[in-house]
Image (cartoon, grey):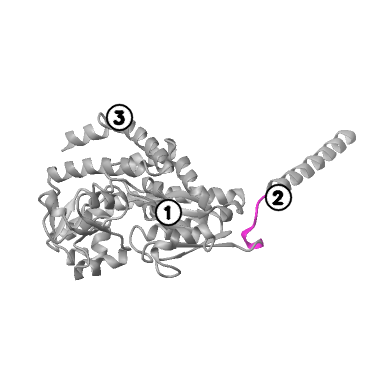
Amino acid sequence: MRFLLGTLFALSALLLGGCQQESGDVHKGVVNATDVKPIEWKLVTSWPKNFPGLGMAPERFAQLVTQMSNGRLVVKVYGAGELMPAFEVFDAVSQGTVQMGHSAAYYWKGKVPAAQFFTSIPFGLNAQEMNGWLTYGGGMELWQEVYQPFGIMPLAGGNTGVQMGGWFNKEINSMADLQGLKMRLPGLGGEVLKKAGGVPVTLPGRELYTALQTGAIDATEWVGPFNDLAFGLHKAAKFYYYPGWHEPGTTLEFLVNQEAFDALPADLQAIVKVAAKAINQDMLDEYTTRHIAALESLVNEHGVVIKQFPDEVMAQLAVLSKQVIAEQSMQDATMKKVYDAYIDYEAGVRKYHLISEDAYSRFRQ
């Protein structure tokens, strides 16, 4: 009996020691946030600080990163004009002046023509289709390839859904009404307007109201009711047109300095990617919901006139869009590569959606 008790005691001591050692091994790789100095990143945006929707996406991203990392990675957000102008975000991230940015890829068409496909193109993919292409259709790999020479890693950073066609100080009854029209319209949509005889202008959001009110421009598009109401665009123009043929599924972007990202430990890298993915969906959810009340306010409280572009105008814009995109793609090898991949995916998803999403929408109405 004494031998048995002694043996059991020795075995218990051995097991206890093993458990203590195992416990120590399990916690060996866990970092206590109080034991290390937080990594601090700067994130600059192309939007006014805390602007509804667009401006809140990077703020929410920063909050998620801090929470998920237990304070080990802290991201400070700066709105347009706080550290730099709205359209200098790309260069700042590329040069490592800041670690991150939040913007829209079509703003960089002058230096990266292919980037336009990763925001939205006229009569192109909608939000659901863009997310599918980027995540599972090879689009993200192409986006990474396009930005790699600039030392930037792109991440999808939100989607506004189908936008509105814009605010106009005169009615658009035919293509002739677009002749000489000065309109804030970025990306390939602006090039289509130019081919139609209009004059595209690129302006940051906070300048739109004044430009429209003073007559510096004749029309402008921004996003949709939620943001347009916040900017007070209904006070500067009478007619509000739909649909947003120029941006049917506008994807925003997080730009990440590749060197800064590579310097992070693997778990923080994963947190950055997961937080961006969460914000990408969150923005679309918010816009879908906030547009409802904002549109009702514009119509019922402010007397805004909602008008649909004439079928003739839409049909002609669609023809011009195909011409512009094909012509520009032939001038740049990288853009042609992205264009071919984009239209291949678009053909497949449109064929499927004809008997799913589109068919349902027709019957619901």
Element class at badge 1: loop
Q: Nearer the viewer, residue 363 or 147?
A: 147
Element class at badge 3: helix
- Label 3 vs label 1: CA separation? 35 Å
Element class at badge 2: helix
Q: Residues within 10 Å of mark 3 (few under 14, many from 20)?
A: few
Which residue is found at the position 28% from the left and 51% from the top?
A: 191
Give the answer, above or below, for where 72 lies relative to 22. below
The label shown at residue 352 is: 3
The label shown at residue 111 is: 1
The label shown at residue 188 is: none
Which residue is found at the position 12% from the left and 59% from the top?
A: 170
Q: Residues within 10 Å of mark 1 (few under 14, many from 20)?
A: few
- Ranked by sequence position, the earlier of labels 2 and 1 is 2
Q: Position of residue 187 (x, y in %)?
A: 32, 52
Q: Is residue 189 visible?
A: yes
Residues at marks 3 and 2 touching, judged by CB atoms closer than 8 Å: no
Q: Residues within 10 Å of mark 2 (few under 14, many from 20)?
A: few
Give the answer, above or below, for where 36 lies relative to 275. below
Q: Is residue 282 left or right of residue 169?
A: right
Give the answer, above or below, for where 128 lies relative to 304. above
Q: Is residue 145 left or right of residue 17?
A: left
Which residue is found at the position 53% from the left and 50% from the top?
A: 271
Q: Check disc 2 and report the residue beneath it.
A: 28
What amino acid is labelled 1 in the image? Lys
Residues at marks 3 and 1 touching, judged by CB atoms closer than 8 Å: no
- Ranked by sequence position, the earlier of labels 3 and 2 is 2
What amino acid is labelled 3 in the image? Tyr
Q: Position of residue 31 (x, y in %)?
A: 65, 55
Region in magenta: 28-35
